Amino acid sequence: MDSEQGGNVAREGKADKVGLARLCRPTGIFGGLSGKLLILTVVFMSLAEVLIFVPSVANMRLRWLEDRLSTAAAAAIAIDGLQTAELPRALQKETLMATGTRAIVLRKDGTSRLLATAEMPASVDDMYDLSDVSQLTAIKDALHTLIFGGNRIIRVFGPVGGDAGTGIEVVLKDTRLRNAMLAYSRSVFLVSILISLFTATLIFFAINRIMIRPIRRLTDSMQAYSDDPEDPGRILVPDRGRDELAVAGRHLAAMQTQLQKTLKQQKNLAALGLAVSKINHDMRNILSAAQLMSDRLVDVDDPMVKRFAPKLLRTIDRAVGYTTEVLSYGQTSESAPRRRKLHLVELIAEVRDILAIDPESGVEFLEQLNSDLEVDADSEQLFRVIHNLCRNAHQALIAFSDAEAGSVKRITVSAHRIGSVVSITVDDTGPGMPQKARENLFTAFRGSARSGGTGLGLAIARELVLAHGGTIALVEKPVAGTQFRIEIPDRPVSLDDYRSKSLQEN
């Protein structure tokens, strides 16, 4: 059954990876960023060409009409030079066919002269004055001709050359004008499409080379790294550029490197936890046997034994208690503090006795607190915190030479109460914490201030203080040395407890 479940889990994991790979796989050229970029470029270029196309068609229409007026004006000047009352019908027809009009009128010196005419229409659909045409009016007239033109009679007039007193007027059907505009529109449309495709292709290849390929490289690196984060070869090799994508690549590589280190530390921690769990069972048995033998020391009639036997028993009891909670940090959970009011001076004296500082080492242990100062805390957990800080200070002072110290080596533990908060300070005159330890303070396996240390002590101390609702911090000193400040607040008293206590006192 276990093997079947394992096989199912493996298959599910494989299916999840396959599904993730399908989600991460590009969906063709038009499904990716490059394809979308190509389509958007073509669309935007076409819109730009439309904005250019409309004024261009309007100008083409005006030029076409101006050409007709110029041709009619040339014929009109020639006819006007003949000084005849009326041209022969055949000559009028040829003139009208040459100009593509139905009637030509010459305006000169305030008079109008009909030079040539065919069948005059009963009415004219539109009139256009080319002497003064705005761009907006030209666009409106051009769109009107394209949409509604083709079989309308229009009247067009304008000046001849630069002479404001001489003008020419023609009447014509706009069929040829509309056909010319449609032919011009098709040509412009085809040219616009070619320009759009050519420009879009250039933009596509340029942006694909500058942006899409680096982005695809980043995504491929993320996918490859997620498949096997422990493989150093899966870490991205970033580019050396200065643009945003190069900076993002360097940050991604740094993040992958840091994550790989973290995964390695977690793996080592898991292996360490497994090893400690195996050792823990045997260690508890050994300590239990030592505890039984130490109990018999109480009956020994020796003043020295009677003096140290209780301390030895308390030390072994603590060791037994530590073995039951040795994996609590690896499980990210500490037992809830069993808080009570306790005299802080007794706890600090016990810390001093456990440290057993050798007088010949030159290290002094100084206590600065009132004997009646009480703190609301778990005695065992607070002992671990203060003992850990004092032990670190003692080890730093032992490694600190007398020549470097320049003065007496001293560990000072002071405490005082401010309202409902007890502030405890552990100060030493040692060399101080190095910069690397400061940067990784309270971080397991990285915050050690000495060679060979794990940094677990400060991490556990912080966790225990936080469980009490307090704070622990490194205090900056103007002189050499290290100072930690612990602040433990009293538990809030509920209203029911306060009333019951008041009734008991009364």
Image: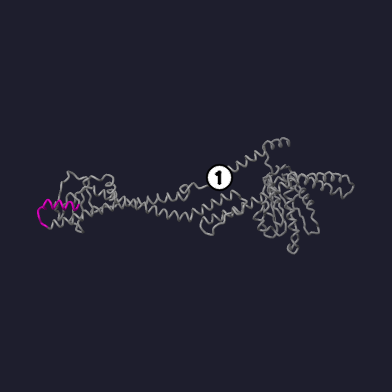
- Visual colour scheme: one colour
Name the side, left or right, on which 231 lies relative to 290: left
Dividing the image into 4 quarters, which one contains the N terminus? top right
State yes or no: residue 142 in magenta.
no
Residue at 65 percent across and 38 percent down: it is 4
Q: Nearer the viewer, residue 338 or 125?
A: 125
| Range of residues picked out in magenta | 82-99
Mark 1 secondary-structure assignment: helix
Q: Nearer the viewer, residue 387 or 279?
A: 279
Q: Where residue 268 appears, x then y in whole percent?
A: 68, 50
Residue located beneath label 1 in the image: 20
Judge whether 286 appears above or below 499 on screen.
below
Q: Where residue 132 appears, x then y in whole percent?
A: 24, 53
Amino acid type at mark 1: Leu
Label total for image:
1
Q: Where residue 129 appears, x then y in whole percent?
A: 22, 51
- Image-quadrant location for residue 394: bottom right
Tell me if mark 1 has few (under 14), some (14-19) or many (20+) residues whose alpha carbon lies within 10 angstroms of its own: few
Residue sitting at the far bottom:
403
Name the side, left or right, on which 159 lies relative to 435: left
Name the side, left or right, on which 46 lies relative to 439: left
State yes or no: residue 92 in magenta.
yes
Q: Where residue 243 appears, x then y in whole percent?
A: 51, 57
**Helix, strand or loop: magenta stretch:** helix
Dividing the image into 4 quarters, which one contains the C terminus? top right
Q: Nearer the viewer, residue 487 or 178?
A: 178
Residue sitting at the far left:
85
